[in-house]
Amino acid sequence: MEIALVQPEIPPNTGNIARLCVCTGSGLAIIGKPSFSMNEAAVRRAGLDYWHLLKLEQFADWTSFVGARKGRRLFALTRFASRPYCEERFRTDDVLVFGSESAGLPAEITRGLAEHSPESLLRIPVGPDCRSLNLANAAAIVLYEALRQTGFPGLVIEAPKAR
């Protein structure tokens, strides 16, 4: 599994997602320029001491990212999708794409995906008064559902032995 963030804006969200990726054996792709330095203290603090374990790739733009992901399914999470994420049957090499905290995914990305494969647009159900969830929470919700469906590959399911 892989999480891709398009121009993330809030350092602690990206740090939390980085930690999520390490703890689940997932990759993290940053697409475009984040609004902060990846060395910023808030990003590093949220990611704790896991940074050296993170499979991180950065891409200048969407086109270069898509070119590097040929043959893999891309799923864009957007509030404008009609299909809930839990209706998808995920595979271990799928990529979950999330937009920035304030703007979501750029319209040209969702339009392009909708034209190519409309089933690739997914949403997380929320109440009628809610625009969106926190980015790190949204990534965790969808990633863990995908991992559950694929049998939690590489993850420890049993509880550790008592000390």
Image: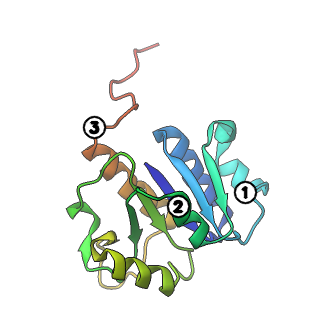
Taking 109 as reference, is 2 above or below it? above
Query: Which residue is labeled 2 in the image?
Result: 4
Distance of label 3 from label 1 (alpha carbons)? 33 Å
Q: Which residue type carries mark 1?
A: Ala
Query: Which residue is labeled 1 in the image?
Result: 42
- Residue 69 x, y percent position in the rendering: 49, 58
Q: Regarding mark 2 in the picture, which secondary structure is present there?
A: strand
Distance of label 1 from label 2 (alpha carbons)? 19 Å
Q: Are marks 1 and 2 in contact (CB under 8 Å)?
A: no
Distance of label 3 from label 2 (alpha carbons)? 21 Å
Q: Are marks 3 and 2 in contact (CB under 8 Å)?
A: no
Q: Earlier in the sequence, mark 3 or mark 1?
A: 1
- Determine crowd level at label 2: few under 14, some 14-19, many 20+ residues with C-alpha closer than 10 A: many
Taking 48 as reference, is 156 above or below it? above
- Residue 154 x, y percent position in the rendering: 40, 31
- Frontmost of labels 3 and 1 is 3
Query: Which residue is labeled 3 in the image?
Result: 151
Q: How is the image coloured?
A: rainbow
